């Protein structure tokens, strides 16, 4: 079955348009460059009272973890050193304001390991961690990524032009993660659309989980079905269906919601610099630094939040218990105290870790899969589309969005 025929491109545009209603709540209406203001704020003080969007002067919808609490004091962090201090102290800076409940009907990110801490987080993460280590990248590439990438390119390779952000970047990760769950291609967008209502995702997954319990396969649902968790008394047990659904909703949300934007950011950076694109085309080992530099230079999720569990001080600022700290990792990635010429996209700079995938115990579980998708996808485009370049007759891509940043359309010609 051809992916190019079964994916409704107009529906993809609706679900993955940063300016559309689906992502508007995360600051999709923000179209300015935040970095000059973030530079100024970091120079004034690395830790400041207020939210990141408030300090930017943006008054549109800007939902993010920690923001629905108007009664709590809010602080924002803009330097690399201050972000690092928060990530290294998970006891004081927690991922959620209290204990995380799990069970029937509790399938949202706030009830997942994303919000857990301590032993609870370690137990849940350890169940799926083996499927996301670097050595497993080839498992993902071989089983799902390569097929999705080439089927998508088949849909436009003969046309001489394409719009890569929606017709390629947005589709690769959603097909990869849904494929790893055994969801047919024709249902992939149904899953993405249903993420606003996790119960609807569960209804799609319910028959798949039941089938894998009867006959496991070489896929991610089977990994979850066969995983064992040790409870507080040291007794191992298999995951319940509800625990599997909670994992699945989290992985689907993360797997279809971030990599596409980062791939588009990386592609745009290369296409806007033809000499760099030429170097990468001729030496594919440069793809890795090109991707890592885009993660530092413009992470698609430029802010993460933490809750303060007791009165503390951070870089000279008193943070009361119960307040929310917003880590502006976008600003931290361009901190001149850590990187020279931080506003330049330079794939030759010495690689140093950034916080694009978060940090410490909550570093992104799927970061190696995301890198594999970007590396495989961009590499295939360069292999199959000779002379790939931005369409000179179309509006060039721009970077928009606040708490979910990405490129607009990426129109290209080739051949």
Image: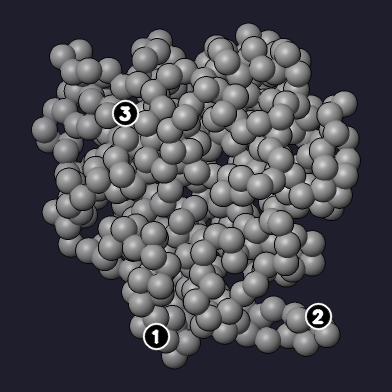
Chain-order first, disc 2 or disc 3 = 2
Q: Nearer the viewer, mark 1 or mark 2?
A: 2
Name the mark on residue 211: 1
Above-or-below relation of 409 to 143: above
Foreground pick, 126 / 154? 126
Describe the element under mark 3 as helix, strand or loop.
Answer: loop
* Residue for badge 2: 232
* Residue for badge 3: 408
Q: Residue at x 35, y 21 (%)?
A: 398
Above-or-below relation of 94 to 84: below
How far is mark 2 from mark 3, CA to CA? 48 Å
Label count reads: 3
Chain-order first, disc 1 or disc 2 = 1
Q: Residue at x 64, y 12 (%)?
A: 40
Task: Say whether residue 143 is visible.
Answer: no
Looking at the rendering, which quadrant does residue 270 occupy? top left
């Amino acid at each position: 079955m051809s992916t190019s025929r079964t994916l409704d491109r107009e529906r993809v545009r609706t679900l993955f348009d940063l300016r559309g209603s689906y992502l508007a709540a995360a600051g999709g209406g923000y179209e300015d460059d935040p970095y000059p203001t973030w530079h100024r704020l970091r120079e004034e003080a690395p830790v400041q009272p207020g939210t990141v969007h408030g300090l930017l002067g943006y008054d549109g919808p800007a939902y993010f973890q920690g923001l629905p609490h108007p009664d709590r004091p809010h602080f924002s962090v803009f330097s690399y050193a201050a972000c690092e201090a928060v990530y290294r102290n998970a006891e004081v800076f927690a991922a959620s304001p209290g204990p995380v409940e799990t069970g029937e009907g509790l399938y949202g990110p706030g009830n997942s390991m994303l919000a857990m801490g301590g032993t609870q987080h370690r137990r849940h993460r350890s169940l799926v961690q083996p499927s996301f280590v670097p050595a497993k990248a080839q498992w993902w590439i071989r089983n799902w990524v390569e097929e999705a990438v080439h089927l998508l390119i088949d849909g436009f390779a003969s046309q001489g032009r394409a719009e890569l952000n929606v017709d390629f970047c947005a589709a690769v990760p959603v097909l990869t993660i849904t494929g790893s769950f055994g969801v047919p291609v024709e249902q992939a967008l149904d899953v993405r659309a249903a993420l606003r209502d996790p119960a609807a995702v569960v209804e799609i997954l319910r028959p798949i989980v039941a089938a894998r319990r009867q006959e496991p396969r070489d896929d991610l649902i089977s990994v979850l079905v066969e995983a064992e968790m040790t409870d507080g008394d040291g007794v191992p047990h298999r995951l319940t269906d509800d625990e599997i659904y909670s994992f699945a909703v989290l992985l689907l949300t993360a797997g279809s919601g971030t990599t596409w934007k980062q791939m588009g950011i990386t592609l745009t950076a290369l296409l806007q610099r033809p000499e760099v694109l030429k170097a990468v085309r001729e030496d594919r080992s440069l793809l890795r630094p090109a991707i890592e530099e885009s993660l530092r230079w413009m992470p698609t999720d430029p802010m993460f939040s933490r809750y303060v569990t007791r009165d503390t001080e951070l870089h000279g600022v008193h943070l009361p218990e119960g307040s929310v700290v917003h880590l502006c990792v976008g600003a931290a990635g361009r901190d001149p105290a850590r990187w020279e010429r931080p506003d330049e996209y330079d794939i030759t700079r010495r690689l140093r870790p950034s916080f694009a995938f978060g940090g410490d115990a909550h570093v992104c579980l799927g970061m190696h899969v995301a890198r594999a998708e970007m590396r495989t996808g961009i590499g295939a485009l360069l292999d199959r589309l000779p002379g790939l370049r931005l369409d000179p007759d179309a509006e060039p891509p721009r970077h928009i969005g606040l708490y979910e940043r990405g490129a607009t359309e990426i129109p290209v010609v080739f051949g």
